[in-house]
Amino acid sequence: MKRNILIIGGGGVARVVAHKCAQNNAVLGDIHIASRTLAKCQAIIESVHEKGSLQRAGTLQAHALDAMDIEATKFLIRATRSQIVINVGSPFLNMSVLAACIETGAAYLDTAIHEDPDKVCEAPPWYGNYEWKRRQACKDARVTAVLGVGFDPGVVNAYARYAMDTHFDSVESIDIIDINAGSHGRYFATNFDPEINFREFVSTAWSWEDNAWKANAMFEHRKDWDMPVTGLSTTYLTGHDELHSMSKNLGVPNIRFWMGFSDHYINVFTVLKNLGLLSEQPVRTARGQEIVPLEVIKAVLPDPASLAPDYTGKTCIGDLIKGHKNGQPQEVLIYNVCDHKTCFEEVGSQAISYTAGVPVVAAAMLIADGTWDIGEMANVEELDPVPFIALMNRMGLVTRIRDAQGDRVVEPEQEEVDTLASSQLLQYG
Ligand code: NDP
């Protein structure tokens, strides 16, 4: 049993994580929130109290922390007696927070791959450049580290694993499709950190084709999908975190990521990029000031968390998987639909933050009760997806499947949860 949570970050996802931890504090214990700006953590705590999210009376405390400072992070982990750290700060923090966890023995969770502020779109597989280099260190210290356990990456990795285990003998392709059919009413905004959002799209869009990495240009490949609820949805082939672990762990020859973009987003993005305003490299102004254009764009765009009150519409994110079962061709869409307004009413955040925040808390609960406390590093598709999907169904993210038999809720059997080995990595391919 592990108890007491340290949440790192004070943004939109951290807000969801704080509410969901509070709703489950009988299992999770004390909750501490630490970020660079103390006021953001305090505002989250106020909102947890306002919504009455605490399952029972307990510790809920804010701290100021620069999580790039490993010693300060270690000190806070120890001072708060936190045995699980949920890192939902900027992806620049992953390696320092992971180091602090390895040195204190706390379990580590995040929702995005590590990034170096000075580099964009490094050579694939991205996990090999940073996180996987600490795999042995986690094993030696018996530290559980679950990487990328938001929605995408995260739930979509578990969906692939679950569908492969239950619906296929062999799989030829996995297309991950991410549609946000919501509207925030602003001229232009990104749904999570603009700096991270743009960094995803300024360079090569890597896809996994015929068991090899393929370099594509951003917005080079367009595809329309008939999705549940959101209907006919336009997407573009995009590079994304989960391809960089699923390609290694699942033995599937083709894995692609498709993200929905409006024409308006593409126009604004293209203008900013062509003007050089999306560059991560510093420029010097006439007054001698050195500035990073991308950081300026982030500073002038709306804070993603501020979009929540006016957001309407739904997201639909899932995996379209093609392969064979009993010698017959098989096609399955496994997905979730989430409503922006419902999320706001429950926790004060929009659906993009909600779909990222709920899974990482579900994962923390599985570590707390031992089910996923494996004492080493893993990507989500390496772990048993059954308890994870079953728990999220009860926490506000319901999984559905659409296939030749129709469209229905996925309810992983309780017996499956009990019979699968609870504390070992499941190996594939
Ligand atoms: P925000 O930008 O809203 O929040 C990031 C937070 O990190 C801010 O509170 C920021 O503090 C804090 N932070 C930055 N640097 C430091 C530091 N050195 N020390 C301490 N705190 C720091 O991001 P989101 O909440 O939208 O996203 C959080 C994470 O979730 C990101 O990694 C994002 O990529 C990921 N994500 C994952 C998704 C998924 O499905 N897998 C979907 C959406 C997001 P300050 O405000 O003071 O700058």
Image: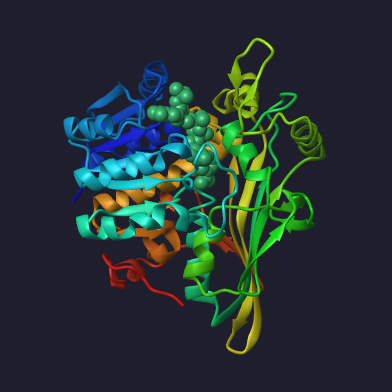
Percent across and percent down for residue 269 are 75, 35
Identify the residue shown where x is 39% and y is 32%: 19
- Please state if 303 lies on the left or on the right of 73 as rendered: right
Q: At 61% across and 82% down in the image, what residue appears?
A: 324
| Residue at point 72%, 27% (across, down) | 188
Q: Looking at the image, is 296 positioned above or below residue 29?
A: above
Camera-nearest residue between 122 and 194: 122
Quarter of the rendering containing residue 190: top right
- The answer to whether residue 362 is left or right of residue 237 is left
Provide residue 167's location: percent of width, then percent of height: 54, 76
Residue 373 in sight in this render: no
Identified at 33% across, 45% down, the residue is: 98
- How does the figure colour the protein chain or chains? rainbow
**Which residue is at the front of the view, 146 or 97?**
97
Query: Which of the 4 image quadrants contains residue 14?
Result: top left
Tell which of 266 and 413 is nearer to you. 266
- Residues 263 and 229: in front is 263
Q: Can you give x and y, in whole percent of width and height, for residue 121 in the image?
A: 60, 48
Look at the image and tell me whether residue 195 can be seen.
yes
Point out residue 279 in the picture as x, y percentages from the top left corner.
Answer: 66, 33
Q: Is residue 182 above or below residue 179?
A: above
Where on the picture, by quarter, is residue 74?
top left
